[in-house]
Image: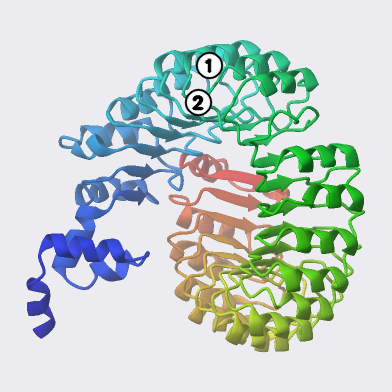
Amino acid sequence: MLSESLFSLLTEDLLIRILQKLDSDRKSWRLVCKDFNRVESLTRKNIRILRVEFLIGLLQKYCNIEMLDFSMCPRIDDGAVSILLSHGSASWTRGVRKLVLSRTTGLGYFGLEKLVRACPLLEAVDVSHCWTYGDREADALSCAVGLRELNMDKCLGVSDIGLAKIAIRCSKLERLSLKWCLEVSDMGIDLLSKKCLDLKFLDVSYLKITSESLRSIASLLKLEVFIMVGCYLVDDVGLRFLEKGCPLLKELSAPLINGLKNLKQLSIIRIEGVRVSDFILEIIGTNCKSLVELGLSKCIGVTNIGIMQLVFGSVNLKTLDLTCCRFITDAAISTIANSCPNLTCLKLESCDMVTEIGLYQLGSSCLLLEELDLTDCSGINDIALKYLSRCSELVRLKLGLCTNISDIGLVHIACNCQKLTELDLYRCVRIGDDGLAALSTGCNKLTMLNLSYCNRITDTGLKCIGYLVELSDLELRGLSNITSIGIKAVAVSCKRLADLDLKQCEKIDDSGFWALAYYSQNLRQINMSYCNVSDRVLCLLMGNLKRLQDAKLVHLDNVTVQGLELALRSCCGRIKKVKLQSSLRFSLSSEILETIHARGCKIRWD
């Protein structure tokens, strides 16, 4: 009674100001009392829909929505949109500024146009991975004349005609992504460049365009970020057009970098899988003094000399990607450490000539390092991890396939890198329960942990994982020594678990999956292929996990066809993806397959 009387003294304006100070836990806030719940409803701006049947009630409750996300709702279609817009006055649409419709393949041009027209303030739309979308859907999108941001990645049917309608009607566009829109050609890009003069971000990756498109794009005086990965018909001539135009260009992601001498304002360069020389890297280092991020992933010809010439004087460099640059050694790493004290992200996957000597320099000089990828670096050992542990700001660390590290090295990381949120130990076969015990006390902020094929881990180690209460993503694939006892410990304690991989964990039986069904209510993805689960418990699991979106159910030897059908029926109203054994394609009834498809679920056959 006392607390309620105190809360009643707080005005609505004051409650709103308090709520704005909260980081993320709005759910706990609204459970305090009715006044808190009302204020939370009034101030909520973003909402993600998981089930279409709750949509009308949610929009009635949250009337000031600015961003509406349907990407997790596979059942949204033209009919659902019509019902939604015809219900009451549909006043919720008046303030909507952003629609996320990624992967909503059930929504066609009719529903899309009605939804777009109902939102007069609409500024941003994401229809990425709506692979059935074509020019009619593009025409529907063009009704949003105030559009400033549009993502059409993998809208495979959109051609120059559809792009022209958007360019003519949506002349205020500032950000546009056309990645994998394979029907768009030079003609469409030319018209876009003439009509949408405010473009600041443009992604044309994997389009069949030529250097003529770059001639057109060079006229975009406000362009800051340009991405054209996989545009193999573009040559050096096209890049020279960019040199003469685009005075504000700061980020270029492209397969070619000859001719960068006049792009001195570039702060981000990403290059993928091309042959480079020491001379080219020297040009970048000499001319691009504002460089903050450089990606050389899978580039051929990257050497110690080239990297040394590149980073000398690059004091502003914060992100460096040297993935699969296999000739890099400790000499280059030492130069990077000494030249780039502000480095926060370094990717060295498959650089197997890097050893503890290079890590010593990183641990001594790069104390701001937050992300490090050492996947498949066979030269990394426990001593290297000891040196690395000086980087106490580390948040993401990948050590997959580093077979020479053990619990000893992991203890060093756990003791000093207490800000870690993501740790990948894939196939680190010498990691065991002692290492997990150290992590459970030292790195209790972990949200992602990959322990796949670390076969020394037992139920004792899983009980330690139970202390990682922030954990949301856990991969335990191929752990032959864990049982249902360990899985129950994880399920009971890790309430935020959303993604779980148990493939080939053959000692986990019904009791383990029963625990997941009752305690892991936030699970959205699960891989239980090759596991020993029965018809009854599979049906219970699939029915109880109300937020489940993706399930991999391959080679469940103890599950019958009838049991699998019952399990699929229990979740087909909400699940988006399911992976099944290909031999079941003709065993499952056509009725269940049609039902699953009609509900918006995609079946992948293994």
The amino acid on which the numbered mark 2 sits, given as a three-letter code, is: Leu
Nearest the camera: 354 or 55? 354
Q: Which residue sits at x=64%, y=58%?
A: 553
Query: How far apart are the alpha carbons under marks 1 and 2?
Result: 9 Å
The amino acid on which the numbered mark 1 sits, given as a three-letter code, is: Leu
Residue 103, x across and y down, in percent:
51, 39
Nearest the camera: 276 or 526? 276
Q: Tell me, yes or no, whether the two marked residues, 1 and 2, touch with CB atoms within 8 Å.
A: yes
Q: Quadrant of residue 544?
A: bottom left
* Residue 350 seen anywhere in this rendered image of the structure: yes
Q: Is residue 77 left or right of residue 488?
A: left
Q: Is residue 497 left or right of residue 478?
A: left
Residue 348, x across and y down, in percent:
79, 58
Task: Answer few, some or many: residues within 10 Å of disc 2's Cα (few below 14, many 20 plus, some between 14 and 19).
Answer: many
Look at discs 1 and 2 and give the one toward the viewer. 2
Task: Answer few, some or many: residues within 10 Å of disc 1's Cα (few below 14, many 20 plus, some between 14 and 19).
Answer: many
Residue 190, x across and y down, in percent:
59, 12
Q: Is residue 351 above or below residue 310?
A: below
Residue corresponding to mark 2: 199
Residue corresponding to mark 1: 192
Q: Which residue sits at x=12%, y=61%?
A: 12
Nearest the camera: 314 or 112? 314
The mark found on residue 589 in the picture is none
Q: Is residue 597 above or below residue 216?
A: below
Residue 454, x across and y down, in percent:
77, 75
Q: Quadrant of residue 347?
A: bottom right
Tell me which numbered mark, 1 or 2, is placed earlier along the sequence.
1
Image quarter where the N terminus lies is bottom left
Q: Is residue 413 left or right of residue 356?
A: left
* Residue 1 seen anywhere in this rendered image of the structure: no
